[in-house]
Amino acid sequence: MLYKDANAWRAAPQKRVMVYGMSGLGKTHMSSLLRDTGQWFHYSIDYRIGTRYMGEFIADNAKAEAMKVPFLRDLLMSDSIYIGSNITFENLTPVATYLGKPGDPARGGQNIDEYKRRQDQFRTAEIAALNDTAYFADRGEALYGYPNFICDTGGSICEWVDADDDADVLMNTLSQTCLPVWIKSDDAHTAELVNRFDKAPKPMAYQPAFLARMWDEYLSENNVSEGDVDPDSFIRWTYAKALAHRQPRYAAMSRWGVTVTADEVAQLKTTADFDALIEDAIARA
């Protein structure tokens, strides 16, 4: 680990962490708490994806929809209006909207080939954004004078690494830059996430093999063709299975760093709380 023991963490003049886990367990809460002190540079992977690596895809998709409206088409063709996405740390909706959901176009779905194409674009973008972590850790200090750094990852980070492999390039790159911190959930948290998702299903990224298996199983179990799939029904059906699929992958990543619980993260109020939490986690590890 980047910090070999609790004493090394406590004495470090420069603290660098990477937080990961299921969306909704407190990654952004932790990152915002630290950022607001003015002593931590907050690097959001999803923000980087949306602004650097998928910005043109997102804007072009919005323009394509606008081009279907004659009034807007004329304005676009004469450069009279500008269409772009307003992505912020708190609003990453443009990325999710572009990813979309597979199924019946009349209900807002995409055909499965287009959906897989966008999934692959996201996978490439997320890996690239993760590989930028060291650059932003150095940039935050050199350009802005932030002594500390937190990388706020997306929930799908576990899909692109083989954490059981000591030679995994991405895990080595990340762990040499930051201390990986897993926010671990329990059954109650997982149930709450499923309940929350059921009320407001949102697009998410999947490992290609997992997505292919889920798609085939859904079509078979529900005896429907691709064009008849209810997009929201499919992603609701898939969500709990995706969480179960990811849990052992997160657990495998935990050996590269430390583990904290969602309850511990929810109790954070100050940077002193955060420092103590990581110190205890290192001691436990």
Image (tube, grey):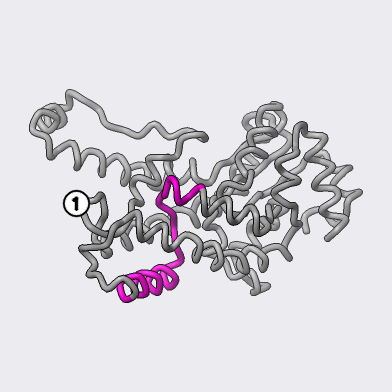
Q: Quadrant of the N terminus?
A: bottom right
Total marks placed: 1
Q: Is 201 part of what is drawn in magenta? A: yes
Residue 99 placement (x, y as % from top left) = 36, 51
Q: Is 152 part of what is drawn in magenta? A: no
Main structural element of the magenta stretch: helix, strand or loop?
helix
Q: Quadrant of residue 249?
A: bottom right
Where disc 1 sits, the SS reads helix
Q: Residue furthest top?
A: 80
Residue 254 placement (x, y as % from top left) = 71, 62
Q: Tell me the kind of residue under disc 1.
A: Ala
Q: Is residue 112 left or right of residue 250?
A: left
Q: Is residue 253 left or right of residue 108?
A: right
Q: Please give the name of the residue rendered at 72% of the width and 30% of the height, measured from the top-left corner.
A: 39
Callout 1 environment at 10 Å: few (<14), some (14 to 19), or many (20+)?
A: few
Residue 253 placement (x, y as % from top left) = 66, 64
Q: Please give the name of the residue rendered at 40% of the width and 68% of the height, measured from the top-left corner.
A: 211
The answer to which of 182 and 161 lies nearer the viewer is: 182
> Magenta span covers which residues?
196-220
Q: Quadrant of the C terminus?
A: bottom right
Residue 72 placement (x, y as % from top left) = 14, 30
Q: Is residue 106 left or right of residue 202?
A: left
Q: Please give the name of the residue rendered at 61% of the width and 64% of the height, measured from the top-left corner.
A: 247
The answer to which of 204 and 170 lies nearer the viewer is: 204
Question: Which residue is label 1 attached to?
Answer: 106
Q: Please give the name of the residue rendered at 75% of the width and 37% of the height, measured from the top-left corner.
A: 268
The answer to which of 117 and 234 lies nearer the viewer is: 234
In this picture, is 43 found above or below 175? above
Q: Quadrant of residue 138?
A: top right
In this picture, is 41 found above or below 214? above
